[in-house]
Image (cartoon, rainbow, N blue to C red):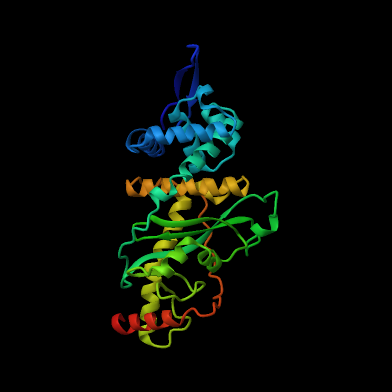
Amino acid sequence: MLNNKTKTILSNSQKSFTVQIPAFSISAFRRCIFICTFFLLQLGKQDLFFTQFNFYFCSFGFPFQKQLIAVTILCLIALRFYACGTFYQVIGDNMGVRKATVSNVVKAMSVALGSLINQFTKHQFFQMGNMPSTIGAIDCTHVHIQAPCEREWEYVNRKGRHSINIQLVGNADLIITNCVVKWPGSVHDPRILRESALYRELQSHRPNGIVLGDSAYPLLPWLMTPFPVANTPDQARFNSSHCKTRCAIERLNGVLKRRFACLNYLRVQPKVACNIILACIVLHNIATRRHVPLDDNFDGPEPDVEPEQPPMFFPNEGHPGHAIRDAIVRNYF
């Protein structure tokens, strides 16, 4: 463990005060500093980013110019919350700031990071797994939240818990290439897909490959689902290969919630929760691309494995998808 450090910060009046930085494990400290350094030195547009962050911070009632907290400390406050997911009061006690300051820093940093989502999640699909021409895998995962004040019933999922249902598309490197973060937990996975910009884009401009989804999704020319019942050995081999390749998205969901423990339960309202989730997705892609390791000593709760939803029928969908799936089986299995 590192010893607690103190940092002296000067205000405009040259009066100083100290902020105590809590002890981190070596690996946790290295990961935090690594990501902070990325923001400060390697983003390339740091002035623009922190101008935006300044704007968001002011919009929550805390003018940045009047804060006697270094930008690196603000980053560490937000990163500590994302990584731990504990109460704002606990974060504030550890970082030497007030609970209200932690709340506003997390909100402002989440909005600022969320504004970069299109920059860090792009449709850069690559071949993956044993399935031919596979360019990605799609799935939804629930992020549990406290009961919202408004329209509480919409957020109750099939397990009876309040949640945000987020759609993720990932590749073999566990990079999130597309996400939808806005739907309450009661909304089913196929509806989230059908209402998404990704669905409209891939329906109108067929990709040069296929995306894998579980049996809850419709069978489409670009979206392959497994056979409900494998009637031949070829179909059984297809289902086995489909499962092995699609497990990348399951691993991605687990890594995301393991790296950012706050996603196991957010004690905030839905709008703030969505901003925090987007921020974690941006940070996940940054960390994955730069090979930031997970904490080997992680002992938090394992993410819930959502049971597959029953297949849903969509008129005029499935027939072209059946033909393509049958052709894949004939040619490759």
Res. 2 in view:
yes
Q: Residue at x 55, y 67 (%)?
A: 191
| Quarter of the N terminus within the rendering | top left
- Residue 149 image position (x, y, % from top left): 70, 48
x and y percentages locating residue 115 in the rendered image = 47, 44
Residue 90 sits above or below residue 160 on the image: above
Front residue of 115/251: it is 115
* 260 sits to left or right of 101: left
Q: Position of residue 310 (x, y in %)?
A: 56, 74
> Residue extending furthest front?
204
**Is residue 236 shown above or below 168?**
below
Residue for point 69% across, 58% down: 153
Residue closest to the far bottom: 232
Residue furthest top as drawn: 14
Residue 131, by quadrant, is bottom left
Q: Is residue 229 above or below residue 183?
A: below
**How many numbered circles are shown?**
0
Residue appearing at x 64%, y 49% in the figure: 146
For image coordinates 36% across by 49% down, the residue present is 288
Q: Nearer the viewer, residue 74 or 202?
A: 202
